[in-house]
Image (cartoon, rainbow, N blue to C red):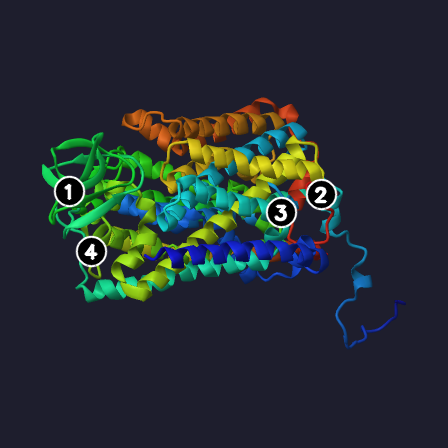
Amino acid sequence: MSAGLGLTAVLIVVVAALLIGAFGLRLSRTTSDFYVASRTVSPLWNASAIGGEYLSAASFLGIAGLILAYGADMLWLPVGWTGGYLVLLVLVSAPLRRSGAYTLPDFAEARLESMAVRRVASVLVVLIGWLYLMPQFQSAGLVFREITGAPAWVGGLLVAVVVGVNVLSGGMRSITFVQAFQYWLKLTALALPVAFLLLAWNHAGRPAPHGDVPPVFAEAVTVAVGADVTVRVQRPVTVTATGRVDGRAVRGEPVALGPGPHRIAHDTTVTFPAGTPVPHVADLPVLSDHEWALPLHGREHPVYATYSLILATFLGTMGLPHVLVRFYTNPDGRAARRTTLVVLTLLGAFYLMPAIYGFLGRLYTPELLMTGRTDAVVLTLPGRLVGGMAGDLLTALVTAGAFAAFLSTSSGLAVSVAGVIGQDILRGGVPSFRAATLMAISVPLVLATVARSLAVADVVGFAFAVAASSFCPLLVLGIWWRRLTTTGAMAGLLIGGGLAGGAGFAVIAGGPTTGWAGALLAQPAAWTVPISFLVMIAVSLLTPGRTPRGVARTMVRLHAPDTLDVNRGDWSPRST
Amino acid sequence: MTPHKGPPRREVVTSPRTRAARRPRYPATMEIDEQTSLGEVYMRSLIRTQFRLALFVCTVLACLIGGLPLLFMLVPALREARLLGLPLPWVVLAGLIYPAFVAGAWLYVRSAERNERHFADLVERE
């Protein structure tokens, strides 16, 4: 693709975000104060805003990449990220809105009347937020390198700075309209290229990945390797390479690669003859196209991994810090339900597309299995299938969509995390909000540069697992079970959140990736969620004296229909 | 009204009972506000109804979502099956499941709102 167009697309998105940030400040001071304006926002706008904030780099780029690499099992990921809203709708949405809580720590305090539980909830919000932000920055680096060739940290830093400026100016976030617009931008940026891609695919006679061999390079192809990779060659092959292969400098001469692992240094180009099986990067499984298309084949212990993924995504959605805040902009519990229904529709429409990208990627961009940059499939396909100016324009559009995804999700998360750090961990007030914003953004940015690069959707998966193992039990038991006690909630949050978070950091830090230990750590939800629920229930039953005193009034507040004129207590959130 | 003799006089009712006429009864919302045991019974019945509904939806969802991998595991032929020329698992997981979610959510919202209407009618009626 032409670097100029892509860079222009990124610049437009970045400048638009900054301008909106600058003007948003003025707007939010005059007309659209968050809390007041929100009361007039319709469910469609509100739902678009939730969708805009929710669809992150993992949804926009990550899912398609994982489908390309692992196949049908990864279809569960978007299913779970949508289905999570169905669980949220039936178990949580209306009571949570009626609670009046603005953040998850607010809910913990309102329901359990305990500052200690509130603080634990705050720490967990920060942990989940960081886990979610880190891969956003990593992906931004990847995309930016794809366009400009700049080192990976540049793109991450760019997004971090824009988000920081925006959060500090208070603009972007306060306007529901902006986040709502982001949803429609992301939808268009995926849907328009899909139409062209499918036309091209149809024109080519609708090929499909099949056969009992892994993908092969259909014609001679030159692959540019961005970062150092170790690839496994299956059949001996002679390639021409420029750069470093197996530690040896080569300048366009033929290199014979025997079966087995080979180390290819960054910025090396390798030309393969037609018909070569694609050498896979070391940590991706080598699947034949036939296996790839079938469920329960992608990873080790696929049945366990599938169920664990389902549990994490379906139950984790309700515990994400940036989701809850948006529910506050509904006028009442009934509107919260209707908004969630619209969110489900909007997400369902969006998630129809990543599978198409993953499918076409398997056909047309198999070299990503060698470079390991499967996250780039969405960005690579338009240029590959639709040539010329149209291809360049579509690539620019997808790039703009990707940056919109980084900016909107990161802004939403950064505001939530900064709010919680400022309010509950520092002392509150404007100066500590500034310091909090810096902490909220810089920690994941540093993590993004030092941690090894995992697939964006995998790291986001840990954020979901932590949320599902801590806030899901807190919300579900808090809303439906009167006998939940302060001690029980605290124990469940600490143990569930601690175990899932520990597993995540172990994998990010380079823990085991194979065998049962690898599977249990990579997808912890299947054991951490039940443990967390059990601990919360058991400890609550053992400490009946620690039931909050106002639980009856809180239950009225959570469940009484909005139209009913009853005493709902006088609690109101502090973090405003 | 003064008592009078003879057959009861027929009267035309021109308006429904007024608010004043209903005053003497004790509204259930006050029972709830004052946290009497009757108020508790009202609240518990609402929470139980809503919880049953939520549990019903979650159970259906769990059977559907939890059942699919199990089905694929136990009946390998299903993994290979095709629908409209496309592989069945892809048609279900990348397509049909989303409208199913929306339909389920719509039915849930309708039922939940109906439960709340019934409850409001119950406690506001005297």
Q: Is residue B44 above or below residue A117?
A: below
Labels 4 and 2 touching (C-beta < 8 A): no
Distance from label 3 to label 4 (Cα)?
46 Å
Label 4: state its secondary structure: strand
Label 1 neighbour load within 10 Å: few <14, some 14-19, many 20+: some
Q: Quadrant of the C terminus of chain A?
A: top right
Q: Residues within 10 Å of mark 2 (few under 14, many from 20)?
A: few
Disc 1 secondary structure class: strand
Q: CA distance from mark 1 to mark 4?
A: 41 Å
Tell if the residue under mark 2 belongs to the same chain as the one under mark 1.
yes
Please state, as top left, top right, bottom left or bottom right, where the N terminus of chain A lies in the image.
bottom left
Q: Are marks 1 and 4 on the same chain?
A: no
Label 2 SS: loop
| Front position among marks 2 and 1 | 1
Q: Is residue A388 left or right of residue A566?
A: left
The residue to which callout 2 is attached is A572
Residue occupied by mark 3: A559
Instruction: Identify residue type, mark 2.
Output: Ser
Q: Residue furthest top?
A: A542
Q: Tell me whether circle 3 and circle 1 mark residues in contact (CB < 8 Å).
A: no
User: Which tag is nearer the camera, tag 3 or tag 4?
Assistant: 4
Which is more toward the observer, A90 or A77?
Answer: A77
Image disc number at residue B82: 4
Q: Chain of mark 4?
A: B
Chain label for disc 3: A
Q: Residue A70, image x and y in percent?
A: 27, 42
- Residue in view at x 62 percent, y 50 percent: A328
The residue to which callout 1 is attached is: A240
Q: Does label 2 lie on the same chain as label 4? A: no
The CA distance from mark 2 to mark 1 is: 68 Å
Badge 1: chain ID? A
